[in-house]
Image: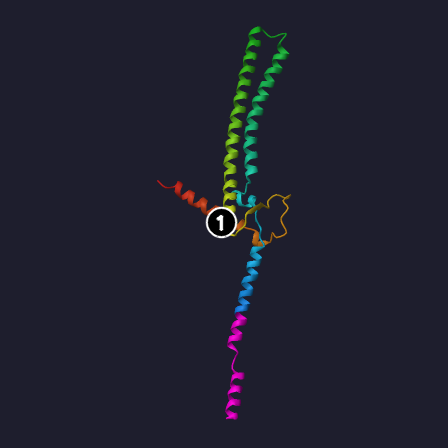
Amino acid sequence: MLNSILFEMEEIVKRPKLPKLMMSSISLIAGTMCLSAIAFGQCKTAIVNFREVTLSNDGKTPEAKFDARVAEWKVKIDAIQREVSAAQTKLQEQSQTASQASINELNRTITQKQRELQSTLADAQRDVDSFRESLLAPDKKALEIAKEIAAERGITTVLDSSFPTTNLPIDANTNCNITAEVKAKMKANSSGADATDRRP
């Protein structure tokens, strides 16, 4: 009887401790999940490079496009201003020697060009204001998408990292950067809108 009991005890000792091994594996998996949750939970601020998100396919920033539009209007306005200045200078030079008819003609030219200048300035202002709004539209949409993605992660604050003066928080690790996700969603929305526009 004693020999039988000793044999059974030896067999028990020899058996693999499966319950203990399983508990170790479960503990390891749980620990890994816990660490991931902690890393994710550390993000209190979502980081987005909005300049990168809104960069157009031609590589131009909204600022560059806006400056180019303003420059186009400036060329037109400067040309009219030169014509006004030239007519005024001519009037001053010929005021003592030119005929009254010539002086009247110069005055009409000056008045006409000044009206053209005022009209062009008004047109330029309306155009650049409208163009600015069209350029800001993607920025506003990107911010909306960024807030949606951040909310899904339980984050309430979104910070733009594209400005050199931006002070990133200490917890701003790579897990907090959602720039790629915002770009992907912006692209998907843009593709969907283009497909809708192409419908007959």
Q: Quadrant of the C terminus?
A: top left
Q: Residue furthest top?
A: 100
Q: What element does badge 1 sit on?
A: helix
Residue at the disc numbered 1: 184
Residue 103 sits in quarter: top right
> Toward the viewer: 61 or 140?
140
- Where's residue 141, x and y in %? 49, 42
> Toward the viewer: 157 or 101?
157
How packed is label 1: few (under 14 Cα within 10 Å), some, or many (20 or more)? few
- Where's residue 100, x and y in %? 57, 6
The three-letter amino acid code for the residue at tag 1 is Ala
- Say whether residue 57 is visible: no
Seen at 52% across and 22% down, the residue is 119
Magenta stretch bounds: 1-25
- Where's residue 84, x and y in %? 58, 18
- Say whether residue 62 is visible: yes
Q: Is residue 11 magenta?
A: yes
Residue 97 sits in quarter: top right
Relative height, residue 146 to residue 23 (above, below): above
Seen at 56% across and 28% down, the residue is 75
Most common secondary structure along the magenta stretch: helix
Q: Is residue 60 magenta?
A: no
- Where's residue 93, x and y in %? 64, 12
Relative height, residue 20 to residue 36 (above, below): below
Q: Residue furthest left?
A: 200
Residue 109 sits in quarter: top right
Relative height, residue 25 to residue 121 (above, below): below
> Toward the viewer: 14 or 197?
14
Q: Residue furthest front?
A: 1
